[in-house]
Amino acid sequence: LYSSRTLTHEVGHWLNLDHLWGNNNNPGNASSCTQDDAVDDTPRCIGVTSCNVSSNTCSNDAVDGYWTTDVVDNIENYLEYSYCSKMFTPGQKSRMRAALVSGVAGRNNLWSSSNHTATGLNQTPTICAVDIRSNRNMVCGGDVVEFFDESYNNVNSWSWSFPGGSPSTSTQQNPTVTYANAGTYDVQLQVSDQFGNQLSQNFPNFITVIANPGDLTPFVDDFESATQIPNSDWSVYNPEGPGFHVMNSSSFSGSYAVKLDNSAAIPGSVDELVSTTLDISNLSSASLSFKYAFAKRNSQNTDFMQVLASRDCGETWFLRKNIPASTIATYPNTNSSYNPSANDWNTVNVSGITSVYLVSDFRFKIKFTSGGGNDLFIDDINLSGPLSIEDELVFDFLVYPNPANTLAVLKFNLSSMVDDASIKIVDPLGRVVYGLDNQTYNPGLNEIELNVRNLNPGWYNVIFDSPKRKISTKMMINN
């Protein structure tokens, strides 16, 4: 095991220990065999910088009286430079204990009662920080979130506030809250201790609730309309890492694709590109595919990619596709910065979206584990499938003009009359911003004018919902 224990090494110096080769910072000098660290049970040595267990750099170990014969160097000692350190000797322990009871440099202040009283350590600690965590930060409408107080010290009362949640307040230490509507919500917590001290903290945008049912298929993203990730269609795991981002070069089609800056990642780190909820309950089967391009730096790189699916809004995930390190590369190894050409892209077809996944809150994610390779590029993600027989009712469902400014037209064909239908425009947070309810539509072509004059610029879902069929399409507002 090769590891640096620099802090332990330096604390040893503070507690009056020298390097094993003596009081200098220059290992490797033969003259150090005549030096001493003032600890008898550490064999004499000149100082080593490797973990050779047979190392024996001095032959005069018996001079200190502890050893009766020549022994190997203590390469695993914390006061060596070998970087496989894991021990102090009994003699070093005794020397450190003697240093702790000495008044030199105030070392005895660490444990003396008078110093603990003077610095307040003998007092009961008071509250000093508010912190929380939850079992999930992104959920679907109707899901339950468990919150946990991690404040300190000696907290004995809690006052929570959950805007958008039920209950909206709680005095429990670790409450459970249900969120019904899509949106992003703050959480507030005020805590108190036995002395009446109080602290409060607001945690902005702590909970994100996504729509359930989700967007209807087909779900196609070529990233031509995306400006950043995360967005309403995608969230990410490991946002503090190099991360996924939209870029306007090296795409498979169009001008834009998603890039993971894997070349800057720490080997073993994990990044995930996670979809929003998708309603595929009206499909008889589902097919997921996407394009990707990737190059290793060398044959020792261990990067691999997986596709996982969830049938409960992301609470549990199941592996559907694995692309191992042995087959992940789409281009020969290169130490240079990698940008794919048109011939570098592979297609991933995920066949494991079986009938148990045909639900209204389906999600999927692309999970990439870094192994030292180059950057990863993703484009043209497509989730689709044939409709169930009972859903083959609405055809040619589209909005024009798209993008729209003040007026748009929803156009669709019906195979039979539909009663009790509604048309809704829904924003990225799942809020209905325009609606026509209890409508009847005749077989054949239908064209419905939509007044979008008061909608803010951005993407919206236009949804046709009836007892027989639900279908949606996206619309961009540019006003």
Image: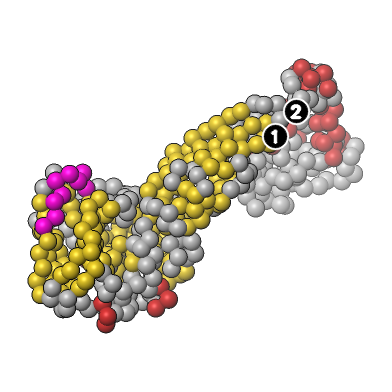
Look at 61% across and 41% down and name the residue there. 171
**Main secondary structure of the magenta stretch:** loop
Foreground of the two, 331 or 140: 140
For the residues marked 2 and 1, what is the alpha-carbon distance in whole angstroms? 8 Å
Disc 2 is placed on an element classified as: loop
The residue pinned by badge 1 equals: 154
Find disc 2 in the rendering and name its residue.
124
Number of callouts:
2
Task: Identify which amino acid the numbered label 1 is placed on.
Answer: Asn
340, 36: nearer the viewer:
340
Question: Callout 2: 10 Å neighbours few (<14), some, many (20+)?
Answer: few
Please tell me which of labels 2 and 1 falls first in the chain: 2
Please report the bounds of the magenta region as a residue range: 449-458
| Vertical position of residue 114 compared to residue 252: above or below | above
Q: Is residue 321 left or right of residue 449?
A: right
The amino acid on which the numbered mark 2 sits, given as a three-letter code, is: Thr
> Relative to 18, is 77 above or below?
below
